[in-house]
Amino acid sequence: MGIDIWYTFVSVVGWFVFLFMVAVILFYSFLLLVSLVQLRKSYELDEWEPYEELLDVSYAKPLSILVPAYNESAGIFGTVRSLLSIEYPEYEIIVINDGSTDDTLAKLIESFQLVRINHVIRQQLKTKRVKAVYRSKLYRHLFVIDKENGGKADALNAGINVSRYPYFCSIDGDSVLERSAFLKVMKPIIDSDGEVIASGGSIRIANGCEIESGEIVKVGLSRHPLVVMQVIEYLRAFLMGRIGLSRHNLLLIVSGAFGVFSKRWVIEAGGYAHTVGEDMELVVRLHRLIKERKESKKIVYVPDPVCWTEAPESLKYLRRQRSRWHRGLLESLWIHRRLIFNPKYGSIGLVSMPYFLFIEFFGPVVELLGYVVMLVSLFFGGVYIEFAILLFLLSVIYGSVFSMAAVLLEEWTVRKFPNVSDIVRLFLFSLTESLWYRPLTVWWRCEGIVDVLRKKRGWGEMARKGVSK
Amino acid sequence: MQQPAIVYFFVLFISLLIVLTSLFLYLVIRKAAENERRRKIDAYKTSYQQTVFRYLNEGIGEGELSCRSPLKQQALLELFEEFSRLIESELVQARIRAFAETHFQPMIRKQLFHRRWGVRMNALFYIEDFQMKVMINDLERLYQSAKLTKSEEIQLLKIYAIFDCPKLYERMLAPKYPLTEFAYRLLFRHMNDETLKAIVHRFAQWPPLMQYAFIDIVGIRNRSEYGVYLEQLLESESEEIRIRSLKAMATMGYFLSHEKLIHFLSSPLWQERLMAIKVCGKIRANECIPHLVSLLSDPIFSVRSQAAQALLRMENGSQWLKEVATSADDPFARDMAREWLERGVEVWG
């Protein structure tokens, strides 16, 4: 009798997993279709012409570029150097030294001949104490803020206080931007007369590319299987997910590594908060503000402007990153839980938030359940083996097939990889995703959830973590 | 679970894989072909470069530039486009235009009516770069077509502005898609002086965004002949129009009488105060110094900052700032004066 209950239990869980996956597959297919139509439209559009006009100062809105730095002595010079040569008519660069314990500040002072200036700071957002503001003698648009350590969010808020221009962009210290990236990411904001209040670019993985003095010379693909899988994952997340969401103003993430925001809106929303996933949390808060004020503002994703960032090459760091991301997601969802299924917040409350809760957040849990059911079914034998096969095929569609589609989508539309061999490798690797990489990330993300549950006050603890790794 | 269900599912799965794999094969083959095509075009470009350069500079050797194969044509198209961006000379631009009109017209026309948006946009960019006025009828046909998108419309109107097309004005007033302020600015920017002069008297009938854009462009293009007109606009009911007019005056340094300036320096609208300060600074209106000094204690941060900046430009302005920096009661005013005194040294010294 007891064993029967177990059989029934496994069947029920199995069917639940089955239906969940079918629903998610349908949703992903919808996103894929929207992206495909969008991307094909602008296929072969000239790289430069649409943006040429924006170089004219009379149209472009000036931009403050914020670079938070915590112990980045090794990379900071290169990052700032590459920012000094970007293509944009009017901008300032503000590096925020967030109480580094190494020689980040000394290096900046020496390389760029910084002089301390007497700058009145407009405290629109509360931050830790700012010790000094410096300005470069060589480049008049380069400023450095030296402040007490307060974490990445605090550093960005301090940068917002000091910035002079109406739009700001946050950039991670260890990423490389294409020279025209700012023009491209600002275009929707300028074109729409400011109806777009935040706009995010694509993130790609720099490992395997040739980089010379802060510029991508040749796009390539790393030899490392773990990196190749991450490349595919990013393609999938950006090309497939965000275009579809952006199209319907459902976007909840503007990546912290590269996004432009309207300063006024961010200040009115209260600036960055001390959370693990401060980038997502801010965007949710902006959406919330838009809905509460009943304004028709938008947050968009621009597929083209590319920011290249370094991906972890070892399991250890990748695992840490993934479980941190998942904690960040949970935190944003928890802070804004009132929005979930709240019709007052329109499509954000009814579609976006539930999507992030059920598919992005609970997805890994259900997938893990699926793997367990598969294993158990194998033991049960008989008709259950077929069920296990069915679930397996489904998870292959969920994992590998969509990743393959994302790779094909990239090659069909954006085409950043110059070599045929890169595409072949991407495709073959994506075929294997469901067999090893997917289960790994599912496990890590579930670990992230367990971490949160175990440390009851874990979120506060995480908040005061320095910038970068 | 019945037997057939899983069989169906399996079939579905396999066909999905087959579809993806064939798509993959197609894309890989296409990529290889495209890479080869690009290599050839680049080779042609290198070999044609000298001849094109000679043709543009001396007007000889057009016969050597063969456009027969599509690859060669593409190479030439790209070369001419690059040169059109690099060389400003009118003579060269005329040669580029002549060559483009004789040799590229059919190709660009085909692209102009392509079903894909990206290709149509590229064709519009070519027409603009090469100044191909000969294609005006094709442009008109595109404008009338049902598939015209918003970005195409703006690009088309911009070309109309560059070509001085008489239809532009009515289309600005009744566009197919509502135009943004940015679009209006773009069009005013490229409009020639005569056209501007011809339409300005109908200003009152324009939609507000068009009015704002016009005012901004008067400032940016430094058209001082419209200064008097802007001064009249300062009487407008609309706050936005008054603020923008002041801003345009500041940009071009229009001499506004100090009575009027003082009126706006004490406006209840901080944006008006800010812009009036900018005008004072630009034209060094020394009569306004006492007002500027009192604006160093304005409740709005950017007004204080702008006032300090303007004072620096005045006769004995730094003297005034020093006084405020040392003896003012208001700590905000003191801080601001100090910052700008220091910046002033940076800027001028």
Image (cartoon, helix red, strand yellow):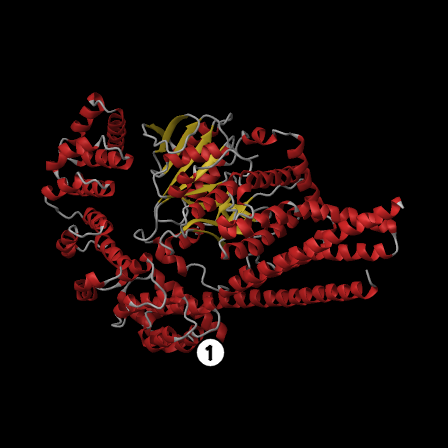
Find residue A302 and report its horizontal and vertical position in percent: 48, 54
The answer to whether one can see residue B293 in this image is yes
Question: Which quadrant is home to the C terminus of chain A?
Answer: top right
The answer to whether one can see residue B61 in this image is no
Left or right relative to A459: residue A224: right
* Chain ID of residue with mark 1: B
Find residue B25 and report its horizontal and vertical position in percent: 66, 66
Find residue A215 and report its horizontal and vertical position in percent: 49, 47
Residue at (41%, 76%) from the top-left corner?
A: B109
Please identify the residue farthest to the right as the structure is shown: A1
Mark 1 is on which residue type? Answer: Arg
Label 1 packing within 10 angstroms: few (<14), some (14-19), many (20+): few
Residue at (88%, 44%) from the top-left corner?
A: A2
Residue at (26%, 27%) from the top-left corner?
A: B338
In this rendering, is residue A325 above or below B174?
above
Element on which disc 1 rests: loop
In this rendering, is residue A16 above or below B164?
above
Left or right relative to B333: residue B45: right
Of A105 and B261, the residue lying toward us: B261
Label total for image: 1
Of B292 and A427, the residue lying toward us: B292
Left or right relative to A338: residue B8: right
Q: Which residue is mark 1?
A: B68
Find residue A175 and report its horizontal and vertical position in percent: 51, 42
